[in-house]
Image (cartoon, rainbow, N blue to C red):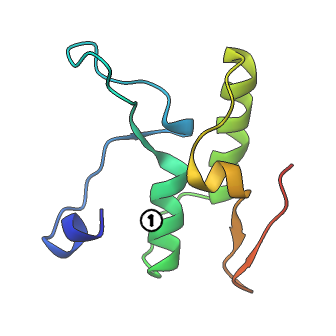
Amino acid sequence: MTAALQAGVRCFDASAGGIGGCPYAPGAAGNLATEDLVYLLDGLGLDHGVRLGGILEAARFISGVLGRPLTTKVGQAGGWDPATGRATALA
């Protein structure tokens, strides 16, 4: 993602919880998780208009409905507080 940003890419396809995949690519692991993308953008100090806590809430809801564990990096870690740089607890 950082290489794409450095190359000027400003539009990414992502999904909460990384849910999904490609029906044309057998064994595809899934999509880029929106919460992981937002975490990166927050860490780089880039404005994007998405609240990490809201995405995590949606991803946890989707994970619960599907009965699948949340496997995204930020989802497993719980998120972070950009004001302090500290990890936030899982809700």
Q: Is residue 22 left or right of residue 15?
A: left
Q: Is residue 60 left or right of residue 24?
A: right
90 vs 66: above or below:
below
What residue is at 69 percent from the left and 61 percent from the top? 79
Q: Is residue 55 left or right of residue 33?
A: right
* Residue at the limit of the structure toward the front, as seen here: 27
Q: Secondary structure at mark 1?
A: loop
Residue 20, position as x, y percentages in the image: 43, 24
* Residue 29, picture quadrant: top left
* Residue 74, picture quadrant: bottom right
What residue is at 63 percent from the left and 58 percent from the top? 52
56 vs 50: above or below:
above
Amino acid type assigned to the residue bearing label 1 in the image: His
**How many callouts does the rendering have?**
1
54 vs 16: above or below:
below
Q: Quadrant of the N terminus?
A: bottom left
* Residue at the limit of the structure toward the left, as seen here: 7
Residue 73, position as x, y percentages in the image: 58, 53
Residue wearing tag 1: 48
* Residue 58, picture quadrant: top right
What residue is at 66 percent from the left and 36 percent from the top? 70
What residue is at 45 percent from the left and 57 percent from the top? 37
Report crowding for label 1: few under 14, some 14 to 19, many 20 or more residues within 10 A (C-alpha).
few
